[in-house]
Amino acid sequence: MTPSPCIVQSDLSVLLEVDHPDFEKAREGLSRFAELVKSPERIHTYRITPLSLWNAMAAGLSKEDILASLEALSRYSLGSNLKTDILEQAGRYGKLILERDPQDQALVLRSSDPMLSLRLGKSETIQSCFRGRRGDAFLVDDLERGRLKHRLIKLGYPVRDLAGYTPGHPFSFTLRQQDRSGQAFGLRPYQSHSVEAFLGPAMSAKEEGGNGVVALPCGAGKTVVGMAVMERLACHTLILAANITALRQWRKELLDKTDIPAQSIGEYSGEKKEIKPVTLATYQVVTYTSSDGSFIHFPLFNNEDWGLIIYDEVHMLPAPVFQFTASLQSRRRLGLTGTLIREDGKEDDVFSLIGPKRFDMPWKTLEAAGWVAQAQCFEIRIPMSDDLMLAYVTEPQDQKRFRIAAENPAKMDVIEALLQRHPEEKILIIGQYLNQLKLVAQRLEIPILTGSSSSSLREERYREFRQGRLGRLVVSSIANVALDLPEASCAIQISGRFGSRQEEAQRLGRILRPKKDSNIAYFYTIVSAATEEQSYARHRQLFLAEQGYQYTILPAQAILSPEPASQPLPEPAAA
Amino acid sequence: MSFLSACLAPFAFKETPQKSLSALEARPSLKPDQAMRCYQNLAPSLRKLFNYFLRRPLGVSWQEAGQRAEPHVLFRLADLGLLVLLPDRQAPCLVAAPVEYCFLITRLDRDLGTLVSALTHYKEETLSAMAKRRGLELPGHRAWLAAALYRAIVQGLGREAGQLDDEEAEILEDTLDEDGEAGLKDLEDEFLNSRIARRRSAGPEDLILGLEHGNGDPIAALLDKGFLAADSGPINYSWQPDYDLFVPSEIKTPLKQALKIRERSQSSLTLASLGTEPAPQKTSAYAETLWFNLRRIIVTSYSRSLKMTKGGSLGLQPLRKMAALLNIEVEALNFYALFLLHAQALTMNKDEAVPNPGFLKSPQDAWKEARKRWPGWVMKVYLLQESNSARRRFASQPMVLRRALLDALMAKNGQWVSTKKLTDCILNDKKLAQKIQNQISYQWYMEPRQIRQWLKPIVEANLDFLGFFGALERDSAKLVARAGPFARNLLENSTPQEALALLSEAPSLRLILQPNLEVIAPLEMGPKEHKILNDFGRIVSLERVVVYSFSAESLYKGIAFFGSAEPLEALLAGSGPLPHAFSALLEEVKSRAGEIRIVPCFYVAQMRQAHLGKALQAIAPQAKPLEGAANVYVLETPPIEMHSVIERLKKKGYFPLVQSPKAGWDSHQSSRYPQAPHPIFANQGRIF
């Protein structure tokens, strides 16, 4: 008899054996009440957290269901303490219910546990969210709904929010069967699952679905998920995007894959201030402050009857929007991200304000299914000249020292060699430092886009790149997110923002859209050997390594050798 | 009507005196501000009365009370419901109202002791809820409500007596046997209060006094610990807060009668009648998981040692950290660690408990050594846990009792049974009781009830003992127990030491190497292998498998410890090819380890005469003249070899002096040697 596929650890992490015949079944079972933490090639790690348990309860599972499922999946019997922990945490769900009083529609918080009720009444941080008592219940200000839930989660008590959502002004449309180019279009299975997971088992104004985060790898079609949710909810929608490029990509996708007329899509940006049934805005414009420090565009959130707010690239959510989102709890909220890693560690805040993670999928699973390109990752280590090394080791400031290594001029030869090695690929050269990028662009005669490039220039360059008139492009950090260039199949990263895992994953994401032919993408990172840049690179790669990506580490000679450029590089070890 | 109710009927206020409760209840409600004014006006008299009553918690005669307050004051107080007049025509008895009124009056003083005392009582809302639960009407005034409630509680006390467990009943019985008021005080202290104390580790006073001065909310703390009940919402009270309401001395007799009836009504329990208890929430975890947890602790202790305090116990902080990683209770971990220390699996090294090198070298031999000490060391470990009181109990424990306990448990096929019932079952078995008495014949002079009382802790101690060896499992509250899978083996097939030897088995199992620099190792893998992984990596998760995470820093640490990465490479080699990221990192660390080499020390020999240098070189050829310094030689020699050089110089008739570089040049030497430090020492810290 084959042993069960999971090992449940006492710290509530669950190790799932990938090669087990019941892997798929176990993955489905686990994902209902545990969060996928990492998915390297052989053992995937899930973690059962209070939040994941509460989400499971919200989705209709009972404590007993969770335990039974875990016991069935576990290779060994579960420890009694572990069971107790799960029962205790799961048992907290439903003790607090936030709902509308049917008489006057006031928002009230009720507790089935008198002790908890007393505790809340005495807690200063919680009390400030109340505006009084009504019998055993607490009266809650509508604007405090998000803050209250956030604080209660921090306290360890989730709120079952049955107060419902504003349905929003109705606005119906349908997804096309074929996009405008005539290609067949439909939701992929995992996209459909994402939509269902977000909306919850039964979509009504009182149900608890309708807020949360969908995490899918870059290039896996998160925009399509957003559009499908919009179609199902059929209401006025506000879409917040990371930048103007992303905003226009949303517009392009909406026009391409839905029957929404162009005049119903508004742009609320630095250039235009349109408000339409579907309005696209950037984080920058909504967080724009006047001279007195007030956010002059925040009324955008409330002045229109939005039924849905979509936070694209939710991992970039700026702090002011964070705070304001706390007061938007009556509207459905969908967060979309490829990498929910915040280097400031505020992932939990995203979960509590936007909503829990409703759906995610291992990157490698999508790669195996062909929904994203198969990526080959390389780290090329190049030496520093003696003079440069002397400057490096004697530089007292950490940031300057890192920059010396990152701007190592010897990287130029490697870039050239890589360009020769991939003459047919559409290549993005991505970096952090403008001087370095300009030098590369100048020497290799490649167009460059940076933050100072006008949006029209950017649009033009991207269009040329998509249409094949431009094969190479040098880009700064503006290309880190929300840049949709499906044709790009090779990225050369020449410098980055220290050890940012999120940036590394996002940059890889630029080339992950499925390719027509071989469906292979190449991701090169060039670092100066034996420097802090190399150490940071290791940290940057951590998230992707946990997603199952393997980096092949090569010395510069492997690229610069006089052998024919077509000589294949060593491939990562087989999974 | 129950027997007890019947017993208590004379005290149920059927007849009312001049100022009866009924009359009080019929009065229109006083407004709160009026009541407070009355309290304040009457405060001096009332406080005096209460001070007296507090010392004598039960009823006090009218006459006696009258000596401490004017009769009109008493009537006035009774009118307000602050005192209750018991209906005795000949000698009306006055019973103190709940102590909270004392609080009402004295709380203005902000006296902490009074506050603490008062907080043990219900608030008004709670009183209402309690009264409602008892089906009482809810008069408008708090005092009347309290009086009515008090009456109901007195009745309830009698009912409660019928539900006492043996120990409580015995305490109550013994207390009631005593004469005079001292006995009544005992009743309160030993029976009622001790009953509460058993449910909680500390009293409300301890809790309040434990709060940092000025910080912390005493009400919240009391609520948290259950000393105060909720004011609203569904009520699920037991009667525990009532213990501060006093039992009139007149009910002593009916209580005694109730206890006798109770004793007669206890049916003789048999094995078949044990029944099955629901599984507990938390077990004490040292039964079925004993072996498993011991191994986990040993593996963890390779990298996270436990520290000993000056007092000789294991430090709480390290215990807590390790307990968090292992997800077991701190108390259980403490127990395990002591076990392992005595089993020599852990040793104390500079006040730190670390895995025993001998155990690592040859676990089998270590256990054999431990086994020789049977039963001494096992007993010692056990007694460490059970303290001196257990030692006394254990010294005379009858083996037949322990065997009987196990038989009874095994008869239930591993189901949970109540330890109380189990104890009763054993003690009610006449034949068994006879055997036990025979084994403890020196106790022949004891009354049967005394023997029973004496045996109870022994039964408890034996249950613990059996649990210690994995023969049975208990819940953390020690309310239920069940036989563990080792029980029969322990009894019939092997000794506990043989079971312990399971720990030393070290099957060679394959590791799982992950590209994200993690290695997953089975817990059953040998301790040597775990040690190597611990030295090169760090534990991130530990249960049936141990997840180790590696980083450049951790690999450096391992290489620094072992001098090379060979142990790790040899260990990982048997588990297939290393993931590229892992091997690349390892190669990088290996190539860079030692890129700066720091020599711990070297010796400088300064000669007064040139020929002495030749003599030194004859003995220590490694001595090299220092360029640019006359008669100065440098020896790159480990300290241990330097010792031998010096000895040989002495044997040759020289008189070398050795000085630690830290000591510098003393005044005696400086008079004979250059004032400035030698260039070698002047360069200290800037060699590279």
Image (tube, rainbow, N blue to C red):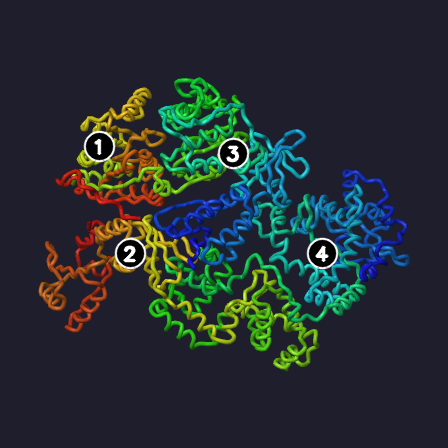
Residue annotated with mark 4? B243
Look at mark 2 in the image and give the residue it sits on: B576
Q: Residues within 10 Å of mark 4 (few under 14, many from 20)?
A: many
Q: Mark 1 and mark 4 in contact (Cβ < 8 Å)? A: no
Quick check: A149 left or right of B141?
left
Q: Could one spot residue B392 in this view of the protein?
A: no
Q: Chain of mark 1?
A: A
Badge 1 amino acid: Glu
Q: Secondary structure at mark 4?
A: helix
Q: CA distance from mark 2 to mark 4?
A: 69 Å
Residue A79 screen position, x and y as percent: 50, 57
Crowding at mark 3 (Cα within 10 Å: few <14, some 14-19, many 20+) = many
The Cα atoms of the two marked residues, 3 and 1, are separated by 44 Å
* Along the line of sight, the residue nearer the viewer: A489 or B297: A489
The residue beneath circle 3 is A210
Residue at figure coordinates x 69%, y 67% from the top left: B166
Q: Chain of mark 4?
A: B
Circle 2 residues within 10 Å: few <14, some 14–19, many ≥20: few
The residue to which callout 1 is attached is: A424
From the image, which quarter does the N terminus of chain B lie in?
A: bottom right
Q: Amino acid at mark 3?
A: Gly
Task: Label 1: state its secondary structure.
Answer: loop
- What chain is tagged by disc 2? B
Q: Of circles 2 and 1, which is in front?
A: 1
Of circles 4 and 1, which is in front? 1
**Dots 2 and 1: beta carbons under 8 Å?**
no
